[in-house]
Amino acid sequence: MNILVTGGAGYIGSIVVEQLIQAGDSVVVFDNLYQGHRDAVHPDAVFIKGDLANQPEINAVFEAHKIEGIMHFASYTLVGESVEKPFMYLRDNAVNASNLLESAVHHGVRKFILSSTANLFDDPEKIPIAPTERIVPGSPYGESKYIIERYLHWLDRIYDFRYAALRYFNACGASHERGEHHDPETHLIPVVLNVALGKRDKFYLFGNDYKTHDGTCVRDYIHVLDLAEAHILALRALDNGSRAYNLGNNRGYSNLEVVETARKVTGHPIPFEFGPRRPGDPDTLIADNQAIKQALGWTPKYPDLETIIKMAWDWHVKNPNGYEK
Ligand SMILES: NC(=O)c1ccc[n+]([C@@H]2O[C@H](COP(=O)([O-])OP(=O)(O)OC[C@H]3O[C@@H](n4cnc5c(N)ncnc54)[C@H](O)[C@@H]3O)[C@@H](O)[C@H]2O)c1
């Protein structure tokens, strides 16, 4: 298939592009490099530097390339920032997606995969979290993803627009060639590995009074290669109908367990201090992944935290400055 990947120069998008190309698909990457890196884009993908805020630029992509499906990763992605700058999220994430969707509909494209988020579930009634859990976005970021899901719901009804909304839990890990490089970096595993690399002296762990076995937040960590496989399976299955899936491993690790495992993998003491709680962090987020396993036959290959951290560490050691030369 010929697939348009927005945000394909970013962390998850670039690794999904790599896997699509390995699977024999053709890929057009559209990214404004706000967070992405040109060198993260697979050399066999067509790269277009463009901004989803600019609808003529998006239309030009559909006119120049016969796009058959879309994977939409491009977004502002930080929960904390979204609380400080709600319009950047509620407006820009939604309008950028709306531009893309309108252009897609106009050019006859009807297949779409959305990077959605576990931040739809701020206050889950039941752990692990089923896709039927009531939706209570935890921030303007989560709300912006929910707005896009609602667009998709209506486009499905009106235009037979087939979509999968993949509500990721914590993406992590790396492939051989590509890994996680954000600026600023806020995700726990790369932050911890940056301490082990000597790039920072220590880090702050937010909160030790959560209602969990060791007082630190518990999260479901999903390897980016398992995420990539889920995207590809979801795209191939779109003719069966539209659906939202929770995408995680059905098990959680606490922040302290992440630090302990990273110490074991890297052999570094990784000093840290406890800081205050971060607003908007629930105690525990774990995905019930039965729906995607049953519907798509998806089986995670790298559910083990030590393997995840080892693969991320290997990439960081090979690329201590990430994609910076
Ligand atoms: N990383 C996670 O744990 C996680 C969890 C849940 C959901 N998600 C979602 O997955 C997607 C990818 O996350 P990521 O961690 O790879 O983020 P990322 O920041 O590495 O990638 C996003 C990419 O989108 C590009 N981009 C942003 N705004 C754009 C615009 N207006 N026009 C064109 N390109 C634009 C950026 O330059 C970047 O390359 C995001 O939508 C995010 O919300 C990520």
Image (spheres, rainbow, N blue to C red):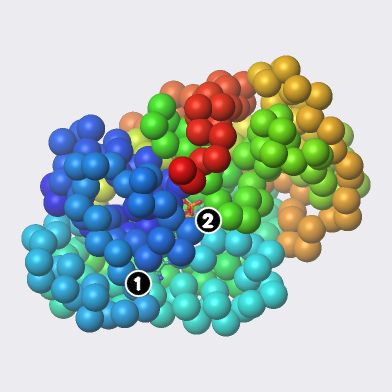
To which quarter of the image does residue 233 belong? top left
Looking at the image, which residue is at 53% across and 24% down?
314
Looking at the image, which residue is at 19% across and 52% down?
46
Specify the amino acid type for callout 1.
Answer: Asp
Give the answer, above or below, for where 168 lies relative to 214: below
Give the answer, above or below, for where 32 lies relative to 310: below
Disc 2: residue Cβ within 8 A of ligand 1's nearest atom: yes
Quick one: SS at disc 1?
A: loop
Give residue 41's position: percent from left, percent from top. 32, 46
Label 2 or label 1, whichever lies nearer to me, is: 1
Q: Residue under label 2, please give it.
A: 117
- Answer left or right for 218 relative to 185: right
Disc 1: residue Cβ within 8 A of ligand 1's nearest atom: yes
Q: Can residue 69 be seen in this view?
A: yes
Give residue 140's position: percent from left, percent from top. 61, 72
Mark 2 surroundings within 10 Å by alpha-carbon count, few (fewer than 14), some (14 through 19), many (20 or more): many
Q: Residue under label 1, please give it.
A: 51
